[in-house]
Image (cartoon, helix red, strand yellow):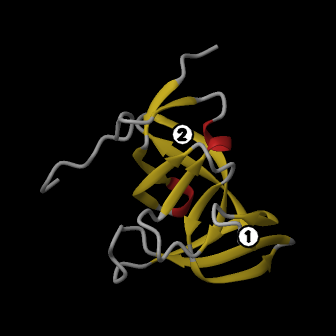
């Protein structure tokens, strides 16, 4: 078995299939599924495949920068958040990259406009790949240097 990665409670990750180079994610072992901030979500069919188009704000505290994304739909599920509220969400399959590592994950699309982090990285995405050091940050996905 390969050695597990050690993640901090927040990490810089990439979503190469969505053409997102860097997004700050909160690593949340209390959440089973990963979640991505999305709005103007529009499902459509293409060549017999259910797909979804959506917009997102990839930068924390920046609602001016928008990214248009398109992804294949893996599922549609009812998800209950930490406050006990249930919501039916689109689930996409996409690649997660962090440091020199890339692997496929499933992620739900939801509005995280009122949340500090645009992305939540849940425990299913980490299973058999990573452990979480709860008092550390940016252990694998290094924090960007000022001006870089």
Q: Which residue of the protein is positioned furthest toward the left in this rendering?
A: 147
Q: Name the residue under label 1.
A: 90
Q: Are marks 2 and 1 in contact (CB under 8 Å)?
A: no
SS type, badge 2: strand
Q: Nearer the viewer, residue 11 or 115?
A: 115
Report the residue at 41% width, 66% height from top. Answer: 116
The disc placed on residue 79 is none
Percent from the top left, x then y, of residue 64?
A: 34, 83
Q: Is residue 136 left or right of residue 18?
A: left
Crowd rating for badge 1 (residues with CA inside 10 Å; few <14, some 14–19, many 20+): many
Report the residue at 43% width, 74% height from top. Answer: 57
Count of residue discs: 2
The disc placed on residue 102 is 2
Q: Which residue of the protein is positioned furthest toward the right in this rendering?
A: 48
Q: In which quarter of the image is residue 21?
A: bottom left
Q: In this view, does 50 lie to the left or right of 72?
A: right
Q: Quadrant of residue 40?
A: bottom right
In this rendering, is residue 102 above or below 93?
above
In this rendering, is residue 76 above or below 98?
below
Q: Is residue 130 left or right of residue 80?
A: left
Report the residue at 60% width, 37% height from top. Answer: 126
Percent from the top left, x then y, of residue 99?
A: 40, 37
Q: Earlier in the sequence, mark 2 or mark 1?
A: 1
Q: Which residue of the protein is positioned furthest toward the top in this rendering?
A: 1
Q: In which quarter of the image is residue 111?
A: bottom right
Q: Which of marks 2 and 1 is in front?
A: 1
Q: Distance between the residues labelled 2 and 1?
A: 22 Å
Crowd rating for badge 2 (residues with CA inside 10 Å; few <14, some 14–19, many 20+): some
Percent from the top left, x then y, of residue 8?
A: 41, 37
Percent from the top left, x then y, of residue 148?
A: 17, 53
Report the residue at 56% width, 75% height from top. Answer: 38
Q: Nearer the viewer, residue 38 or 79?
A: 79
């Amino acid at each position: 078995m390969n050695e597990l990665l050690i993640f901090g409670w927040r990490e810089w990750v990439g979503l190469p299939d969505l053409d997102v180079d860097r997004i700050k994610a909160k690593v949340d072992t209390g959440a089973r599924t990963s979640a991505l901030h999305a709005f103007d979500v529009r499902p459509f069919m293409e060549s017999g495949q259910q797909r979804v188009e959506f917009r997102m704000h990839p930068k924390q505290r920046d609602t001016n920068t928008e990214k248009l994304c398109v992804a294949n739909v893996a599922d549609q599920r009812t998800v209950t958040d930490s406050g006990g509220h249930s919501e039916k969400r689109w689930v996409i399959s996409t690649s997660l990259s962090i440091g020199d590592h890339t692997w496929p994950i499933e992620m739900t699309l939801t509005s995280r406009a009122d949340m500090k982090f645009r992305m939540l990285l849940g425990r299913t995405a980490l299973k058999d790949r990573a452990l979480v050091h709860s008092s550390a940050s940016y252990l694998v996905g290094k924090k960007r240097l000022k001006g870089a």
